[in-house]
Image: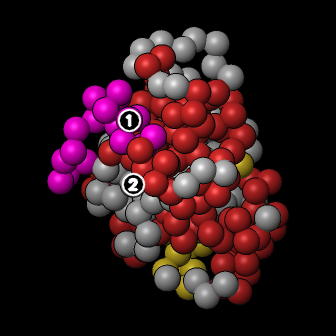
Amino acid sequence: MRVVVAEDLALLRDGLIRLLEAHGFEVVAAVDNGPELLDALMNERPDVAVVDVRLPPTLTDEGLRAALTARAAVPGLPVLVLSQYVERLYARELLADGQGGIGYLLKDRVSDVNEFVAAVRRVADGGTALDPTVVAKLLDSRERTLPLDRLTAREREVLAHMAQGRTNAAIGGALFITEKAVAKHTNNIFTKLGLQASEDDNRRVLAVLAYLEQG
């Protein structure tokens, strides 16, 4: 699996490269600034990119902007964004195109190697991987307006786990309910959020986007 890595801190960048290569990934480019990241994404067309939000030259949101520009040119290009802090706006922007292949993790999650590698693979496969801390922040939002007010407490729990990119089986295991029950709750979520079945739209991603927009 081919990976592009973007991180301006040399020590962390080298660590990411070593970690990924040790788990069978091929790092085809490792860059430390926004312009070089965009070039690498467009030229290499990797299976997944691991990108720091803040890159030179301004150290604001260069990494995110490069990733969004690349995804606009190559729809669905898988991107896992790393950030030092929880910034809900970035999570919303990443999911705004309604497609999968997106992740948002805090940098300290890299220390849990198995979870981090699983998140990279999940994003590369077109899924989503949101940091539990981000999800918790969203749950703590002071304003809860429609359409999420229509959801039951259990449906909110299922949606929170869905936002982390978990499968129905994994959600069932975490909540100690059957996979069939998870599927029922998931269908209820889709119905209450007005997400009709479609060949073009990923309803799980759209449900998560609706969830994020309440933040």
How packed mark 2 is, by other alpha carbons closer than 10 Å (few <14, some 14-19, many 20 or more), is many
Residue 83 appears left or right of 120: right
The colour mode here is secondary structure
Q: Secondary structure at mark 1?
A: helix
Which residue does the numbered mark 2 point to in the structure image? Answer: 100
Q: Secondary structure at mark 2?
A: loop
The image shows residue 64, relative to residue 214, as above or below, that is below
The image shows residue 178, relative to residue 122, as above or below, that is above
Front residue of 174 and 23: 174
Front residue of 152 and 92: 152
Name which residue lies at 72% across and 40% down: 133
Kind of residue indicated by mark 1: Asn
Name which residue lies at 49% across and 80% down: 2
| Alpha carbon distance from label 1 to label 2 | 21 Å
Snapshot quadrant of residue 33: bottom right
The image shows residue 164, relative to residue 144, as above or below, that is below
Magenta residues (range)? 185-201
Tell me which label, 1 or 2, sits earlier in the chain.
2
Which residue does the numbered mark 1 point to in the structure image? Answer: 188
Name which residue lies at 52% across and 66% down: 122
Q: In x, y percent, where is residue 6? A: 60, 62
